[in-house]
Image (tube, helix red, strand yellow):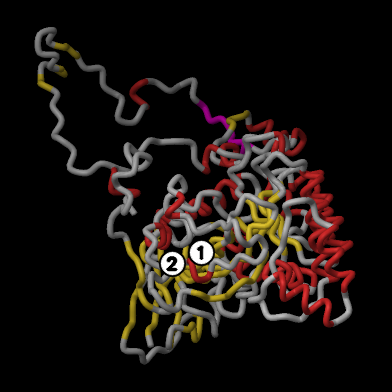
């Protein structure tokens, strides 16, 4: 049993954020969350001035089954044998070097999915990023993954094949265990006097397209609404076609990508279809994303669509934090961005009873932060009540993208943030007339104070007019005859150690 005291706790529940609150943990579970909790535990950790959030959930990646994308021997995310029926449970590698890298970034759970190039990639499972050889699997085969983007076939052909495949699964009812051969399927159909099923099986699919019993069973689970179909699509028209298909087949659908989702946000909301997106996708990478925009997350949420925020890069799944920050700068409420990283994925994948928020009865998967680094660099990762990771150095320090560190536009330079972080100085009369309201200005207005009587002497730290001379030989600078010298700095603000993981 342990107690965390005096922390700022982001619960990701209706309770919101609790200031100077306590959290009681017993046997890896959260027992109580609130203020001034009486504790008689042996371990009491005072986190005054620190922040606690639920562990972040990667809603869709290849964590644990892909090590190096360009080396086939390190990829266990695809199959030439199975399509819809591919389960990656036995291929998941808890010792993958990418797991501690992303765990240190705040990711505690991962929905790991295959990514075969065909229409159906396979079944997805949820893993706890513990690094343990046993006990990593949390939920097995909870969704079927598909993709209508890429390849030489028309998207229309892929959607037709998707529908034909579901129809085939609907009429195939052989009641056999998953480990079965094609010949056994034929024999069973014949014994049950259902020869027409096999004829349909042979004739309904294009040449070269075949499904094993495992594949058909997976499709059957989608039709029975046992698992959702997660399908990658970006173009608004494609999303509409998939919405229509989901209605006709009465299946649970999750859209991954949805770069143009804002264009059909009302339809997605009405159909109650959640979306997995990367808010950073604002520059069209193809003709499928011509309508991409940075306020996509905000517009979807505003229409009532449940959103999940992830990252396209398995190596850097933790960058979902950056995507959430971008979404907030473009209008998404801060609390909803946190839910998109925590409780929303837990709800969509059926894990909300144990993960995704900080409340009694749930697993004590926590991320601790320093306030200045919230959403940037975790202070420590707690799994089941135990510290699992902390800031111990960068495991990819030799990787070419890690050094040198350069400054790039961040949240404050995006969306509506610049307006709120600056001001326009106007005459007091403009404020009295509510010019900002009349013109719909987003930038705050401040009154101009008198400045016509100001002189150099009124300027702080700049009221002197010294004699400055520079030695042309040594370049020494003399101020009023004295050598101007500066001692070397002992600390550098925002130096290299600032963002070392």
| Residue drawn where x is 54% and y is 66% of the image | 88
- Magenta highlight: main SS: loop
Residue 268 is situated, as x and y percent measured from the top left of the image, at 80, 56
Q: Which mark is residue 56?
A: 1
Q: Residues within 10 Å of mark 2 (few under 14, many from 20)?
A: many
Identify the residue shown where x is 89% and y is 62%: 248
Q: Quadrant of residue 368?
A: bottom left
Q: Is residue 447 magenta?
A: yes
Q: CA distance from mark 1 to mark 2?
A: 8 Å
Crowding around mark 1 (Cα neighbors within 10 Å: few <14, some 14 to 19, many 20+) is: many
**From which residue to which does the magenta span run?**
443-450
Image side of residue 413 versus residue 444, left or right: left
Out of 35 and 275, give the one closest to the viewer: 275
Residue occupying the far top of the picture: 472
Mark 1 and mark 2 lie on one chain; the one further toward the N terminus is 1
Query: Along the horizontal axis of the image, is 153 left or right of 384?
Result: right
Instruction: Give the residue pinned by disc 2.
Output: 367
x and y, in percent, of residue 199 in the image: 86, 64
Q: Tell us which disc is closer to us: 1 or 2.
A: 1
Please tell me which residue is depicted at 39% across the width and 65% down the height of the picture.
Answer: 50
- The one nearer the camera, 171 or 150, is 171
Residues under numbered marks 1 and 2 in contact, where contact means CB atoms less than 8 Å apart:
yes
Element at label 2: strand
Foreground residue, 484 or 208? 208
**Image quarter (top left, top right, bottom left or bottom right) of the N terminus:** bottom left
């Amino acid at each position: 049993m342990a107690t965390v005291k005096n922390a700022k706790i982001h619960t990701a529940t209706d309770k919101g954020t609790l200031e100077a609150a306590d959290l009681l943990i017993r046997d890896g579970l959260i027992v109580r969350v609130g203020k001034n909790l009486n504790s008689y535990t042996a371990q009491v950790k005072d986190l005054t001035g620190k922040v606690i959030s639920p562990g972040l959930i990667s809603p869709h990646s290849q964590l644990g089954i892909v090590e190096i994308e360009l080396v086939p021997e390190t990829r266990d995310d695809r199959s030439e044998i199975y399509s819809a029926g591919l389960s990656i449970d036995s291929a998941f590698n808890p010792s993958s070097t990418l797991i501690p890298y992303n765990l240190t970034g705040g990711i505690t759970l991962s929905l790991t999915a295959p990514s075969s190039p065909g229409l159906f990639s396979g079944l997805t499972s949820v893993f706890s990023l513990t690094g343990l050889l046993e006990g990593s699997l949390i939920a097995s085969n909870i969704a079927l993954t598909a993709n209508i983007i890429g390849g030489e076939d028309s998207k229309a052909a892929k959607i037709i094949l998707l529908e034909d495949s579901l129809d085939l699964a609907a009429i195939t009812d052989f009641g056999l265990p998953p480990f079965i051969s094609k010949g056994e399927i034929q024999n069973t159909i014949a014994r049950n006097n259902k020869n027409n099923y096999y004829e349909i099986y042979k004739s309904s699919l294009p040449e070269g397209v075949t499904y094993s019993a495992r594949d058909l069973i997976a499709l059957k689970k989608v039709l029975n609404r046992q698992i959702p179909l997660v399908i990658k699509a970006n173009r608004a028209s494609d999303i509409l076609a998939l919405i229509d298909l989901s209605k006709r087949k009465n299946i649970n659908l999750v859209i991954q990508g949805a770069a143009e989702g804002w264009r059909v946000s009302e339809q997605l909301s009405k159909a109650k279809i959640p979306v997995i997106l990367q808010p950073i996708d604002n520059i069209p990478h193809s003709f499928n994303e011509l309508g991409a925009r940075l306020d996509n997350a905000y517009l979807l949420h505003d229409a009532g669509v449940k959103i999940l925020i992830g990252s396209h890069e398995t190596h850097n799944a933790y960058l979902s934090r950056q995507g959430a920050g971008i979404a907030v700068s473009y209008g998404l409420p801060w609390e909803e961005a946190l839910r998109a990283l925590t409780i929303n994925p837990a709800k969509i994948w059926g894990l909300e009873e144990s993960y995704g928020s900080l409340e009694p009865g749930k697993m004590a998967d926590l991320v601790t932060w320093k306030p200045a680094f919230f959403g940037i660099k975790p202070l420590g990762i707690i799994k089941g009540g135990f510290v699992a990771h902390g800031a111990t150095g960068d495991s990819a320090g030799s990787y070419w993208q890690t050094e040198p560190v350069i400054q790039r536009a961040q949240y404050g330079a995006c969306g509506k943030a610049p307006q709120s972080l600056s001001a326009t100085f106007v005459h007091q009369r403009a404020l009295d007339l509510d010019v900002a309201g009349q013109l719909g200005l987003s930038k705050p207005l401040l009154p101009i104070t008198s400045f016509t009587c100001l002189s150099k002497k009124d300027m702080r730290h700049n009221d002197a007019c010294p004699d400055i001379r520079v030695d042309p030989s040594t370049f020494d600078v003399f101020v009023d005859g004295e050598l101007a010298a500066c001692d070397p700095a002992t600390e550098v603000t925002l130096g290299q150690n600032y963002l070392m993981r």
